[in-house]
Structure formats: C-alpha cells, structure tokens
Image (cartoon, rainbow, N blue to C red):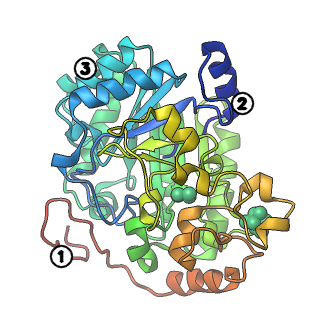
C-alpha cells in the first residue's frame, strides 16, 4: 500500500513554495503510521518484527506538529496508516488538523474498528479518501487469513458506509497462494462496492511475511493465471475500476523499483516518529533512523540523514548493479529484500536475474509453493501466542 509519487512534480511544488529541499524534492505524499497496534493478525504483515509499543507513539500534539511541518515543506497528501490507524482515539482530531493545514487525507484501514458514527465524524473532519484491506471475497478464507472472526462482514459494511458518505473507496486485496483462486470474485466485489480502484497486491516477503513464506507463496501457474485475469479485467472494466497490480517478485526477471528508489520519492514516519525510507526499513539492522523528536527538521532528515543517503542514487552499488544499464531504472530493486535474503542491503536484490542468488530464490519459491504448507504463524498484537492453523 505504499504510495508512489512523481518526484519531478514534488520538485515543482517545492520551487513554488520556496522550500530548502533542492536536491531531492520532498515527496508529494507521505505515509504516517500512527500506531503499530492492530486487531488483525495477517500472516503477511510487512511491519518489522519489533513493533513500537503504545507508550512510544507520538502524542496528538506531536502528530499535529508533524502535519503542519509537512504541509509547510510542500507535502500535499497524507496517508494515515498503521498498524490500524483507527485504534488511535485522536484520529478525527488529526484528520481535522490535516484538513486545516491544507492536506488531502487518505485513511488506510482494516475497517473492523469503525462505526458509522466515527466514519461520519472523519468525513465531517475533511477525510478525502478511504482504502479498505480485504483478505478474500467471503468470510471463510478472509477471516481465517486476518485471524479475526466477523472481520469480512464488517469490512463490507464499512465499504458501503464509505460510499453512502460519498467518500471515494479503494479496495486493497493482498493475494497469495491461499486466496488467489478468489481473484475473479474479489474483482467483482470491488465493482459491487462501487470502488474507484482495486489494488491486487501479491505478498512481498519481508518483516513477518517472511516467516509465512511457505504458506503464502503462489505457484507459477497461479501467477500466470493472475496476469491473465488482471489484464482481462482491466480491459473489461476500463472507466469503471482502475486496477493496480503488484507481482510477486521471486518469479520476476527484474526487480521492482521499490519505493521509486530509496530516498528518491517516498518516506514514512513510524509510530514513535522515526523518518523511514520505507515501511519495512527497520527490518534492516545497522541503520540509524532519525526521529521527528530530534532537533532536526523533517526536510533536513530527508536530505541529510545517513539512512536516506546510504542507498540513495547509484553511488553505493556493487556489481552487477554498478555497471548495469538498468541501474537508474530500478535502482537495484528492494533494499529490504536484499537484506532479508542476502544479509546485506547493499547487494543486488535477488529478484534480479543478474543476481548470483536469483536462481536459488526462484527455486526456493517453487519449493515453497509446492510445499503444501497451509498453516499460518499469526502475528499476535495482544501478547501471548495464538494457535497457528485454521482455527482463528
Ligand atoms: Fe537492476 Fe541491479 Fe539487476 Fe541491473 S543488476 S537490473 S540495476 S537490480
Ligand atoms: Fe524497503 Fe523495498 S520495502 S526498500
């Protein structure tokens, strides 16, 4: 669910507003992870294994200061995310403040904690857009994946309220081996819910998701079928539903341009205020991320901090990226995936065929997909360890 924005547009905005960020334009859209708390326990969660606790979260006053500062330096859009952002009691106040300082706001939510009254309050406070995650098209699969009974029915209800309140809706569907067979019905569900946009996002394997890779990895045949279904639906639903599609990159030939390139057009802020190049960046050990609680401005952190500059541009690259014609196109792929699979975030993402590890991860994907493993290891935010398996 990471927003991608055009950095050139960002620069134009900065020039108009006379910002100090000259080298790397401040992104147009920023993701704020208000909390890591979440009622769902998705086995593909990409948040780091070590989560921020409620007591470490920025206060209402601190988030408001962040919002004002972001508006001042040229950011136009805020994605309120998590964890589950509606777990924050002050969400209406934060949306109101964002609206007051001129920011367009998107709520990225699992929806299960929302009431109609609260959604109405959010709409009245100026909320501009709602994105709801779905784990399937019906409760048997969806509630099992999310580890939350009654979740699917609630999501459908909230999606309907969203449209009744005249808010634009995006349906986000995270896909994997155990729900890909539902894709045609999920596409139809998005149409029936009157969504503008559907994100068909194959699981990316870092953070908690890596622990469940064998239970989630699609087969190559599923992937080919998904490509066909998405292409067909895009054609058929032109003008009705926009479909974004994220492919599972273990099967790819070249890696994705993750985050549009490290430190080029995206940052997010963690619950405790760390300014991060991507939502999974804390899974890379040995990098120091600066906080909005430090004495430096957000624009300064974006431009100058070591963590942003470590993998920015192409100067850090080793072979094969260093002399590759694609280095300015994909920026070597995903740093978090390179770290997760090779132990060094400075290596070529093994999703690339030119990586010496590519063949082994492709084979690993095939082995995982053929493993028959269907039990999930659930992330439990409440403490304690839930039973893995299909009883949630
Ligand atoms: Fe991209 Fe590096 Fe692969 Fe070249 S070698 S395609 S720059 S990841
Ligand atoms: Fe962190 Fe790709 S998810 S760089």
Within-10-Å neighbours for mark 3: few <14, some 14–19, many 20+: some
Closer to the camera: disc 2 or disc 3?
A: 2
Ligand 2 near label 3 (Cβ, under 8 Å)? no
Asked which quadrant contains residue 47, the reply is bottom left
Q: In front: 190, or 274?
A: 274
Seen in the picture, residue 313 relative to 241 is either above or below; the reply is below
Callouts 3 and 1 close, C-beta under 8 Å: no
Task: Give the percent coordinates (x, y) of residue 80.
Answer: 37, 35
Q: Residue at x 72, y 70 (%)?
A: 352
Closer to the camera: disc 2 or disc 1?
A: 2
Task: Give the percent coordinates (x, y) of residue 330.
Answer: 73, 56
Q: Which residue is mark 2?
A: 8
Seen in the picture, residue 225 relative to 66 is either above or below; the reply is below
Q: Which residue is mark 3?
A: 120
Earlier in the chain: of badge 2 and badge 3, it is 2
Earlier in the chain: of badge 2 and badge 1, it is 2
Q: In the rendered image, is residue 3 in sight?
A: no
Task: Give the percent coordinates (x, y) of residue 360.
Answer: 64, 86
Label 2 residue SS: helix
**Quarter of image, ligand 1:** bottom right
Label 3 residue SS: helix
Q: Quadrant of the C terminus?
A: bottom left
Q: In front: 234, or 58?
A: 58
Q: Which residue is mark 1?
A: 387
């Amino acid at each position: 669910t990471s927003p991608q924005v055009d950095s050139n547009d960002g620069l134009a905005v900065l020039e108009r507003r006379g910002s100090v960020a000259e080298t790397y334009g401040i992104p147009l859209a920023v993701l704020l992870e208000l909390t890591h708390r979440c009622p769902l326990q998705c086995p593909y969660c990409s948040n780091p294994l070590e989560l921020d606790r409620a007591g470490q979260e920025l206060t209402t006053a601190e988030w408001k200061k962040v919002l004002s500062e972001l508006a001042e330096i040229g950011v136009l859009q805020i994605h309120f995310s998590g964890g589950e952002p509606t777990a924050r009691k002050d969400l209406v106040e934060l949306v109101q403040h964002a609206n007051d300082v001129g920011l367009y706001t998107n709520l990225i939510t699992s929806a299960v904690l929302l009431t109609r009254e609260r959604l109405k309050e959010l709409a009245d406070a100026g909320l501009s857009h709602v994105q709801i995650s779905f784990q399937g098209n019906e409760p048997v699969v969806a509630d099992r994946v999310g580890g939350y009974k009654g979740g699917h029915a609630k999501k459908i209800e909230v999606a309907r309220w969203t449209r009744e309140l005249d808010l634009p809706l995006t349906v986000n569907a995270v896909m994997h081996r155990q729900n890909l067979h539902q894709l045609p019905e999920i596409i139809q569900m998005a149409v029936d819910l009157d969504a503008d946009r559907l994100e068909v996002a194959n699981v990316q394997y870092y953070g908690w998701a890596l622990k469940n890779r064998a239970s989630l990895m699609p087969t190559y045949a599923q992937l080919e079928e998904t490509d066909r279904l998405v292409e067909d639906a895009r054609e058929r639903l032109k003008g009705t539903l926009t479909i974004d599609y994220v492919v599972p990159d273990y099967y790819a030939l070249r890696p994705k341009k993750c985050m549009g390139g490290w430190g080029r057009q995206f940052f997010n802020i963690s619950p405790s205020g760390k300014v991060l190049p991507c939502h999974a960046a804390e899974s890379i050990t040995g990098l120091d991320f600066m906080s909005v609680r430090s004495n430096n401005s957000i624009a300064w952190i974006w431009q100058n901090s070591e963590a942003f500059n470590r993998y920015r541009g192409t100067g850090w690259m080793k072979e094969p990226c260093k002399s590759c014609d694609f280095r300015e196109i994909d920026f070597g792929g995903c740093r978090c995936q390179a770290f997760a699979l090779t132990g060094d975030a400075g290596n070529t993402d093994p999703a690339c065929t030119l990586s010496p590890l590519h063949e082994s991860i492709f084979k690993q994907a095939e082995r995982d997909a053929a493993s028959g493993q269907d039990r999930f290891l659930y992330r439990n935010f409440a403490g304690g360890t839930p039973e893995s398996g299909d009883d949630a």
